[in-house]
């Protein structure tokens, strides 16, 4: 019998292991890495995302959707390795309502 939470954790672990392999094959770290997120147009959510990037050199652009309900965020951050890329994705993933692209 499978416990739902365990399957979800195993799926996430497999996803991030695969992502790490792909990142290491296609990127030459350290380098700038482009993150893209979509959030509801809520300043508190934007602030939470910015906090994840504290202490990291980055540039950011925002663009509101046509109806103003959502904000697309592009963050170009200097990262040292694939592990740091994944760590940031995991931290942003804890913020409710954020879609990661």
Image (spheres, grey):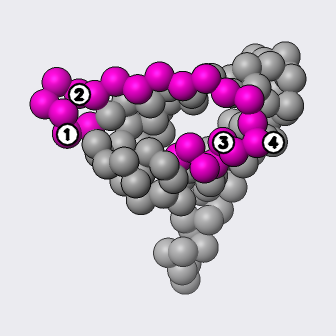
Q: Is residue 83 magenta?
A: no
Per the image, the residue denoted by label 1 is 69
Tell me where residue 41 appears, x and y as whole percent.
28, 42
Per the image, the residue denoted by label 3 is 53
Mark 3 / mark 2, whichever is N-terminal? 3
User: At numbered mark 2, what does the secondary structure look like: helix, strand or loop?
Assistant: loop
Give me the residue at 41% from left, 59% from top: 96
Whether residue 31 sits left or right of residue 94 in the image: it is right
Magenta span of residues: 49-70
Per the image, the residue denoted by label 2 is 65
Mark 4 / mark 2, whichever is N-terminal? 2
Q: Is residue 63 magenta?
A: yes
Q: Answer whether labels 3 and 1 touch (C-beta < 8 Å).
A: no
Looking at the image, is mark 4 or mark 1 nearer the viewer? Answer: 1
Give me the residue at 18% from left, 33% from top: 68
User: At numbered mark 1, what does the secondary structure look like: helix, strand or loop?
Assistant: loop
* Nearest to the observer: residue 22 or residue 52: 52
Looking at the image, is mark 4 or mark 3 nearer the viewer? Answer: 3
Spatial CA span between label 3 and label 1:
24 Å
Crowding around mark 3 (Cα neighbors within 10 Å: few <14, some 14 to 19, many 20+) is some
Mark 4 / mark 3, whichever is N-terminal? 3
Q: Residue furthest left?
A: 67
Q: Which mark is residue 83?
A: 4
Tell me where residue 75 appears, x and y as whole percent.
57, 27
Against 60, residue 83 (above or below) is below
Q: Answer whether labels 2 and 1 touch (C-beta < 8 Å).
A: yes
Give me the residue at 32% from left, 34% from top: 71
Spatial CA span between label 4 and label 2:
31 Å
User: At numbered mark 3, what does the secondary structure look like: helix, strand or loop?
Assistant: loop
């Amino acid at each position: 019998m499978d416990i739902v939470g365990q399957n979800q954790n195993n799926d996430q672990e497999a996803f991030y292991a695969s992502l790490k392999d792909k990142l290491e094959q296609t990127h030459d770290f350290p380098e700038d890495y482009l993150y893209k997120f979509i959030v509801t147009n809520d300043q508190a959510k934007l602030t939470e995302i910015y906090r994840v990037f504290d202490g990291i050199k980055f540039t950011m652009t925002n663009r509101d959707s046509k109806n103003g309900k959502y904000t697309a965020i592009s963050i170009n951050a200097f990262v040292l390795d694939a592990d740091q890329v994944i760590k940031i994705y995991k931290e942003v993933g804890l913020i409710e309502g954020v879609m990661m692209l």
